[in-house]
Image (cartoon, rainbow, N blue to C red):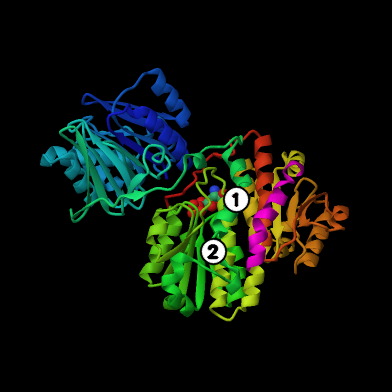
Amino acid sequence: MCGIVGYIGKREAWPILIKGLERLEYRGYDSAGIALMESGAFSVYKKKGRVAELSKFVKNNKLSGGVGIAHTRWATHGVPSDRNAHPHVSNSGDIVIVHNGIIENYLAIKKILINKGYKFKSDTDTEVLANLIEDIKKNTKVSVEEAVRLALAEVTGAYAILVLSKDEPGTMVVAKVGSPAVIGVGKNEFFIASDATPIVEHTKKVVYLEDGEMATIETKKDKLTLKIKTILSKKTKSPYIQTLKTKMEELEKGGFPHFMLKEIFEQPESLRNTIRGRIILEKGNVKFGGLEKFSKELQNLKHLVITGMGTARFTGLIGEYAFEELSGIPTKVEYGSEFTYRKSADAQHTGLIAISQSGETADTLNAIKKAKQDKMLTLGIVNVIGSSIARIVDAGIYNHVGPETAVASTKASTSQAVLLVMLAVYLGRMRGLSKKSGEEILKEIQKLPELVEEVLKNAKSIQKIAEKYKKSPNFFFLGRKYCAGAAMEGALKLKECSYIHAEGCNAAELKHGPISLIDKNFPTLVIAPADSMYEKNKTHIEEIKARGGKVIALVSSGNPEMKEIADDVIYIPKTLEMLTPILAFIPMQLLAYYISVERGNDVDKPRNLAKSVTVE
Ligand code: M6R
């Protein structure tokens, strides 16, 4: 977790660093800090709270420097507080560091350093690393680059770090294992960040540091140079510079009050981008460029495991039904966190499909590493191009929905669900799914962006429903079959943004326990479209009504009877059963959004959360 930014060049560093932190606040926002170097001296400022507060301080105090590092934190070791905020400074003041990740053996190192007389001001693992670097540098008289390298050889865990030394004012050291680090290459200036969003407005040329690599940016005769080497073997390599395609306007709110609402309304377009160029109607098939090389392996698969966390896992539950229905491949969905620690059965015939918007979720990344150890074929459905998951999987499919900034996932989730159905068609066509059936499904997929536009036209009526239920302390979300996962996603969306307790479950499960919670203050949203489960869902609704519960029914347009039964009705257009959850997502996203705004919450950055969870 946490976001790091660094700048080294001729410009004033702080505006670049602060803007960068704002872009990275999705990674954590419980405290923020900055270190600037001017004439061989550091000014360090860090504070509990948001980047906005840090920004005010820096402006008011006219901090200055052409080299700097900055950090926005999501606490792992030590409560959010001024003293635990980054950057951390070593005892003598020589080393300043920002860190994203966890140093697992920090306590053992801390003990050794305490015995040598080091004092600690924070509870963090990062301050230990700062002092370890200082200790090595002092005792072995090596450069900061070498001291960082030697220190990292002693630590275990995950990190992306930026290190400055007072003794070497024109040098910045970057290193990474397990957490992301991107280096932007400008004209005699460098930008470093946890992802490319703080960089794109300055340069499109980037270098993605690989796990186990470190980079040193040095000033030699007024010229900055970048060199990359592996931490353990010291082997150097020439930087591989790639060109980014992200546009600036994709990062801004575009007139919407919140990123979440903007991203909800972007879904017709984001779905078009997901589908574009991938449907070959005349063949009743799908083209995934990234999978072509693996068609033989894909044909041999006998089992599939879909993995991911949060929303990504819930969209996986939609995929599970689609894979079994269209390809006949037995499929299960597993938390990334649990898959990592389970024994794999028949690994050589199993394919792992990892879903992740950010491509940085530690639990999902670990699941892929485990699958690779077991020699499984690993596939990724990832949004962030060049992210850790995108780079580690054997083959992948990008969502192409552009940056998703709000913590609550919206446009990535609908894209994940549609890609899973498309992948099910692709695998199905390898296993006897007829061209005609493939064509029928793909034609419906092509209509989805327009159908989503129709759903979005109901935003006002959903806002009214939100107004009515905004004070409910609890909520149920129910669905069956393809829509069971959608119900879980609806509950997650509401709870993470509104802080209302919400549970999502298979509607059939209700009478096996949860129904005892139902009373007039416990509303339930039931996804009851015109599909094979409609009659069953109607019965579930009647059961809730019979116990005095309030029901919001999410049904297909043209449903004549539900307004007589349910308290509130939301209509979505008819489509195939396997695509219905994609349409059902939208009103639930809007409901969560409007309720949260009504409750005065910071919808884009709900408390205690971060956009990408890069710790286990
Ligand atoms: O970046 P990822 O898709 O791997 O993230 C997984 C979850 O952390 C994420 O979906 C989370 O549940 C969202 N906040 C849900 O809106």
User: Which of the two residues, 186 or 541, is positioned nearer the viewer here?
Assistant: 186
Can you tell me whether the CB of the residue at mark 1 lies under 8 Å from the nearest atom of ligand 1?
Answer: no
Q: Split into 4 quadrants, where in the image is the N terminus?
A: top left
Which residues are drawn in magenta? Answer: 442-461
Marks 2 and 1, how far apart in space? 15 Å
Q: Which residue lies furthest to the bottom in this view?
A: 432
State the image coordinates of residue 175 (x, y, percent, origin top left): 28, 47
77 falls in the magenta region: no
Q: In this view, does 68 lie above or below 77?
A: above
Q: Can residue 573 be seen in this view?
A: yes
Q: In this view, does 404 lie to the left or right of 471?
A: left
Which image quarter: residue 375? bottom left
Q: What element carries label 2?
A: loop
Apparent side of residue 51 relative to residue 471 in the rendered image (left or right) = left
Q: Residues within 10 Å of mark 2 (few under 14, many from 20)?
A: some
Q: Is 544 placed left or right of 244 in the picture? A: right
Q: Residue at x 18, y 33 (%)?
A: 168
Q: Position of residue 452 (x, y in %)?
A: 68, 53
Give the mark nearest the N terminus, 2 or 1: 1
* Residue 64 tag number: none
Looking at the image, is 58 positioned above or below residue 293?
above
Give, as a three-letter code, the residue at label 1: Glu
What residue is drawn where x is 42% and y is 35%? 21
Provide the major secondary structure of the magenta segment. Answer: helix
Query: Counting other residues with Cα less than 10 Å from the Cα at mark 1, is it few (<14), some (14-19), or many (20 or more)?
Result: some
The reply to whether residue 343 is in sight is: no
Residue 462 appears left or right of 126: right
Residue that carries the numbered disc 1 in the rendered image:
269
Helix, strand or loop under label 1: helix
Label ID, residue 278: 2
Is 447 included in the stretch rendered in magenta?
yes
